[in-house]
């Protein structure tokens, strides 16, 4: 199946009844048969799209389902590489596992594995990630930036900034970032990021960005134990949000900001990140595997550590911990 032609068909059909897409013209442009175009129309109908046709003029879109199938996402993409190869799965334990396999088998930079449902979605430290069917964006993006393994942890912060920008652009929600990997709205968790690495000692082979975004859940869609701490875009916005459009926007910004990080270093990302962070200048409780203590958050360092000032004035840089604003 050629998702290029299919996503182009979808994109053009969105112009509405007054601008129908000529099957003949699209077939000629892409060097495929008219029957092939007709098959894509039938395929889209079977995926839930409602398509109208006007004799001798062409097809137009009446209504779209909320799907995250490759063509649905790709019709909105403005990237060069990211999201140009998408593997969509209805249900899987975790897209991270599949992404690791794909990366090992030579997946291209920017390949996306996206699922409608995860049955064993994972967070950091093997914590579970609730991934309700058809309600969120559960995806792993395989990236191959020219970075050293030491520069890899900052990719979490790059992804966080990309996600916040995408949400801001498409919704009225104003998210904040909680170091290192949570995106919050109204103090509740909207999105989590899990960054995993495949590397030689001196070279990154792949960084797999696991992104879990709560989009169209209502409160009852979350397991009881996280209902008080989790939220979704549609809860915050008061109406459903188009998952395909949002997925594409996240990929647009991700490609942009990863390139910015590789070309210009971490400073521009750091400034953006700090502008969205909720903890800077605040008193925080820091829990690591070893201990728990309090300090004041100051900012992030060039290598992505959270800098905190202890009560005796010493500055400490933290790589990995859970932070609570107090
Ligand atoms: P984290 O360790 O920061 O967050 C996990 C914690 O967040 C859980 O212990 C729970 O308290 C809470 N939580 C679980 N599910 C949700 C949810 N849907 N919304 C809000 N809070 C929740 C965050 O780890 C990293 C999450 C990455 C998820 C993506 S989805 C695609 C990819 N595949 C996969 O298995 N993981 C990543």
Image: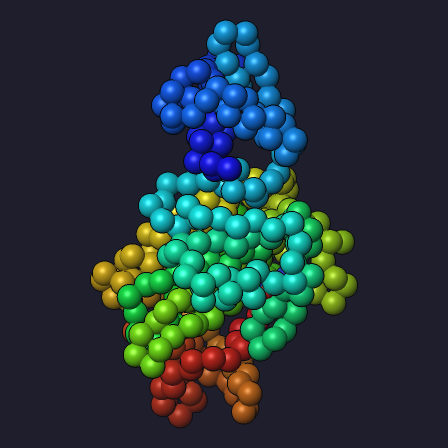
Q: Quadrant of residue 80?
A: top left
Q: Position of residue 93 (x, y in %)?
A: 65, 63
Tell me: residue 254, above or below residue 318: above
Measured as percent of width and height from the top left, residue 239 is found at 63, 39
x 52%, y 76%: residue: 323
Instruction: List the single residue furthest toward the left.
Output: 264
Q: Is residue 108 above or below residue 33?
A: below
Between 49 and 186, the residue placed more toward the observer is 49
Residue drawn at x 43%, y 89% as measured from the top left: 311
Toward which corner of the image does residue 109 lie, by quadrant? bottom left
> In the rendered view, would you say 73 is above or below 195?
above
Q: Is residue 11 left or right of residue 225?
A: left
When asked about the image quadrant of residue 186, the answer is: bottom right
From where the camera sits, is residue 288 visible?
Answer: yes
> Percent position (x, y) of residue 312?
40, 92
Question: Quarter of the image containing the C terminus?
Answer: bottom right
Residue 159 lies left or right of residue 129; in this view the side is left
Quadrant in which ligand 1 is drawn: bottom right
What residue lies at 60% left-to-right and 30% top-to-bottom? 43
Residue ID at (39%, 47%): 252
């Amino acid at each position: 199946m050629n998702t290029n032609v299919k996503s182009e068909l979808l994109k053009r059909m969105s112009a509405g009844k007054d601008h129908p897409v000529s099957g003949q013209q699209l077939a000629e442009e892409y060097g495929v048969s008219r029957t092939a175009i007709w098959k894509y129309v039938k395929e889209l109908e079977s995926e839930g799209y409602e398509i109208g046709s006007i004799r001798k003029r062409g097809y137009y879109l009446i209504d779209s389902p909320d799907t995250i199938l490759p063509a649905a996402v790709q019709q909105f993409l403005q990237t060069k590489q990211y999201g140009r190869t998408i593997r969509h799965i209805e249900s899987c334990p975790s897209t991270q596992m599949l992404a690791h396999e794909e990366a090992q088998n030579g997946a291209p930079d920017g390949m996306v594995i996206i699922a409608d449902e995860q049955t064993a979605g994972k967070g950091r430290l093997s914590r579970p990630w609730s991934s309700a069917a058809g309600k969120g964006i559960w995806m792993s993006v395989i990236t191959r930036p020219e970075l050293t393994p030491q520069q890899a942890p900052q990719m979490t912060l790059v992804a966080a900034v990309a996600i916040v920008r995408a949400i801001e652009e498409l919704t009225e929600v104003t998210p904040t970032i909680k170091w290192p990997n949570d995106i919050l709205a109204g103090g509740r968790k909207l999105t989590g990021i899990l960054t995993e690495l495949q590397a030689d000692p001196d070279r990154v082979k792949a960084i797999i960005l696991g992104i879990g975004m709560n989009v169209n859940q209502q409160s009852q869609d979350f397991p009881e134990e996280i209902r008080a701490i989790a939220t979704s875009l549609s809860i915050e916005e008061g109406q459903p949000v188009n998952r395909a459009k949002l997925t594409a926007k996240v990929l647009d910004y991700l490609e942009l900001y990863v390139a910015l990080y590789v070309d210009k270093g971490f400073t521009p990302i750091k400034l953006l990140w700090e502008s969205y962070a909720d903890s800077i200048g605040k008193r925080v409780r820091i829990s690591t595997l070893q201990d728990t203590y309090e300090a004041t958050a100051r900012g992030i360092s060039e290598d992505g550590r959270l800098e905190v000032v202890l009560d005796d004035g010493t500055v400490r840089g933290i790589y990995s911990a859970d932070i609570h604003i107090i």
